[in-house]
């Protein structure tokens, strides 16, 4: 059975507000997370992804109150990431209304965390968030970063994704830092490479700027397409994207 491709708006949140920048820098205010989540849900979003982009850098927990208020307003799956360091953090997020939890920096620091989360809550709850940069330092040409893209690791992005799936990750959120906010299109090479090794769904993130970018990402192997700027700036709606995908023969909800 062919699964429908999901269209997912992303709410990058800092200090209680949605923010957006380019290449993870020069963040600007883009609105209230609860209001935007409600808007995107009404437009037909399949899921909402909520990333607290400064929680790890500030060494604090995710803003549970905003997660709770968002979950009260939307009745589609809500994925929350940022500042998740333990299975207890996951338990608290799920209790606050999250359906899935994204983990990045803490899993790189301690990979066993992925197994602990998957064993306790199921792989379907665990999303490995990958903030990826192009780099000549790795075999694949892609390296993983932490702390909201601020720190480069020595981990090959593809090797890390493969290991994370073995440890229990149920989904890969693959964000290209190089493409982020540029509106020049998704990194199709990165999507293809991740899809080629992945036994779990791949969410493409970073670079969406026009309607044609979304079917291209799906053609490269994405099971879901995530975007932020084009939705926050009211350049495109969720419905516009779904229509463009359907016109190209992609199954959408």
Image: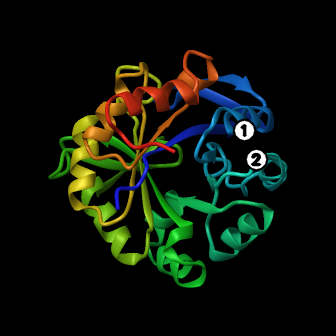
In the shown orientation, is residue 162 left or right of residue 5? left
Secondary structure found at label 1: helix
**Could you tell me residue 136's position as x and y percent?**
18, 41
Specify the color scheme.
Answer: rainbow
Mark 2 residue crowding within 10 angstroms, few (<14) / some (14–19) / many (20+): many
Above or below, 196 against 170 in this view is above
- In which image quadrant can residue 216 be found? top left
Q: Is residue 125 visible?
A: yes
User: Residue at the spot x=32%, y=40% of the render?
Assistant: 218
- In which image quadrant can residue 158 be found? bottom left
**Depth check: 163 or 42 in front?**
42
Q: Measure the alpha-carbon separation of dots 2 and 1.
A: 7 Å
Q: Is residue 26 visible?
A: no
User: Residue at the spot x=35%, y=62% of the render?
Assistant: 1
User: Residue at the spot x=40%, y=32% of the render?
Assistant: 245
**Depth check: 40 or 23 in front?**
40
Query: Mark 2 vs mark 1: which is more N-terminal?
Result: 1
Provide the residue designation for mark 2: 74
Q: Which mark identifies residue 185? A: none
**Could you tell me residue 181's position as x and y percent?**
47, 24
**Could you tell me residue 89's position as x and y percent?**
69, 69
């Amino acid at each position: 059975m062919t699964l429908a491709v999901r269209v997912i708006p992303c709410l990058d949140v800092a200090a209680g507000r949605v923010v957006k920048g380019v290449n993870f820098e020069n963040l600007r205010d883009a609105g209230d997370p609860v209001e935007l989540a409600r808007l995107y849900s009404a437009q037909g979003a399949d899921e909402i992804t909520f990333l607290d982009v400064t929680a790890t850098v500030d060494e604090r927990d995710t803003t549970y109150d905003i997660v709770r208020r968002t979950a009260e307003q939307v009745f589609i799956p809500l994925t929350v990431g940022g500042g998740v360091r333990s299975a207890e953090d996951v338990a608290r997020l799920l209790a606050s209304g999250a359906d899935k939890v994204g983990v990045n920096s803490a899993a790189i620091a301690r990979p066993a965390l992925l197994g602990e989360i998957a064993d306790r809550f199921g792989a379907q709850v665990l999303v490995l968030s990958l903030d990826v940069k192009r780099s000549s330092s790795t075999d694949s040409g892609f390296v993983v970063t932490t702390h909201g893209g601020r720190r480069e690791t020595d981990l090959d992005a593809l090797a890390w994704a493969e290991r994370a799936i073995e440890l229990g990750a149920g989904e890969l959120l693959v964000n290209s830092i190089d493409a982020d906010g540029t509106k020049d299109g998704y990194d199709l090479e990165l999507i293809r490479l991740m899809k080629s090794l992945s036994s779990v769904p791949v969410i493409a993130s970073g670079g969406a700027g026009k309607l044609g970018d979304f079917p291209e990402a799906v053609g490269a192997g994405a099971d879901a397409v995530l975007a932020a700027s084009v939705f926050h700036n009211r350049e495109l709606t969720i419905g516009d994207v779904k229509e463009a995908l359907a016109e190209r023969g992609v199954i959408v909800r």
